[in-house]
Image: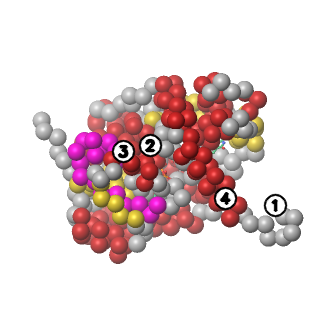
Amino acid sequence: MRKKIYKILVTGGAGFIGSEFVRQAVKQGHQMVVVDKLTYAGDLARLKSVQGKFVFYKTDIADLQKVMIILKKERPRAIVHFAAESHVDRSILDASEFVYTNIGGTQQLLTASREMGIKRFIHVSTDEVYGEISRGKFKEHFPLNPNSPYSASKASADFLVKAYIHTFGFPAIIVRPSNNYGPWQFPEKFIPVIIYKAIKNQKIPVYAKGLNVREWLHISDCARAVLATLELGQEGEIYNIGSALECKNITLVKMILKILARSQHLITFVKDRPGHDFRYALDSHKIQNNLFWKPHVDFEEGIFQTVQWYQENFTWLERKVKFLENYWKQIYKPTHEGER
Ligand code: NAD
Ligand code: TDX
């Protein structure tokens, strides 16, 4: 059977997961249009390997007029919506950008997509919308119980998408991936933080006692799952995307320290994240049984290759770390003499 080729508009395509999706979709022969505001988290360097094979618009998804102009010009068949503010700690410091983009931006995108008769809309949500679970796994029909400002904004967007499906018969699908890891992740997230600090022989901040559990999924498996929902998914459905590979934070740190031959003395237990979800775990049978997707990347191998990638691309990693340090200095300027 010949594969169908689509024109796909990707929001947040210069981000960590969105860029992997664009790289894979280009390889499959799809025509790609990338819309990204290029916030601190966006970087076109992630798309270097497919340069010239996509059309790019530096645009805010919350700007309805501009999004309409792009949609009228490009006429994509499908939209895959990754764009978001994605870092939980940042949402705890200030949730306003999260509400603006994750809720407001999604709503504007839905409005424009409906008006333009988009044939398929994949909304990229997260496992965090379910809240935490001490035993068992989240299934797609479980109630949403978000705990952080980030997950509350993502859950709000899910409700908007669901409302559009119910009210207008809008052809959307929601996907909920677990924690992603791999190359090009911004070093505010845990895995690149560990790798950078370990390489530099610096203290590694582990929240509380490091007993929190996350389900780690390689970005290549995640992007392949999103492509599967685009091609085979059922309109109006929700699909969890998980690897079933659960790992305590402390175990993960020790794994990476071992790969880099660094001392466990670098581990530093710090104050816990406020409202820190203890465990996420997804039941991913639905996507496995109905869309024939399963994860390919072995966790230990995936982590090993990820560490290697950051070693080989250390200049990129360090540039992002330095950017972050300056960024925080700008935001938290001392207001009084002697204040830090
Ligand atoms: P990311 O922060 O790396 O990338 C987000 C991208 O969106 C950036 O390129 C940024 O410039 C862009 N963006 C932000 N605001 C925008 C706006 N108003 N208009 C246009 N573009 C904007 O995020 P990521 O880790 O790649 O996550 C992608 C999606 O997947 C997000 O929706 C996130 O909630 C979800 N998700 C992420 C993970 C994970 O582990 N990283 C897991 C589950 C779900
Ligand atoms: O310095 C750290 N120390 C630490 O112990 C950081 C940055 C994190 N952690 C802990 C908190 C979490 O238990 O590590 C775990 C992973 O933290 P993050 O990388 O910040 O990810 P998480 O909060 O789990 O959220 C991620 O997965 C779901 C993504 O950032 C979200 O966008 C996605 O929806």
Q: Earlier in the sequence, mark 3 or mark 1?
A: 3
Find out if the beta carbon at label 2 lies less than 8 Å from the nearest ligand 1 atom. Answer: yes
Of tags 2 and 3, which is closer to the observer?
3
Query: Which residue: 70% across, 61% down?
Result: 329
Which residue position is annotated with label 4?
Answer: 326
Foreground of the two, 147 or 320? 320
Q: Which residues are magenta?
A: 22-38
Query: Which residue: 54% across, 58% down?
Result: 40
Which residue position is annotated with label 1?
Answer: 340
Q: Amino acid at mark 2?
A: Pro
Distance of label 3 from label 4 (alpha carbons): 29 Å
Distance of label 2 from label 3 (alpha carbons): 25 Å
Residue 186 lies, in percent from the top left, at 54, 48
Residue 146 lies, in percent from the top left, at 55, 52
Q: Earlier in the sequence, mark 2 or mark 3?
A: 3
Which of the 4 image quadrants contains residue 63?
bottom left
Find out if the beta carbon at label 1 lies less than 8 Å from the nearest ligand 2 atom. Answer: no
Magenta stretch contains residue 89: no
Which residue position is annotated with label 2?
Answer: 177
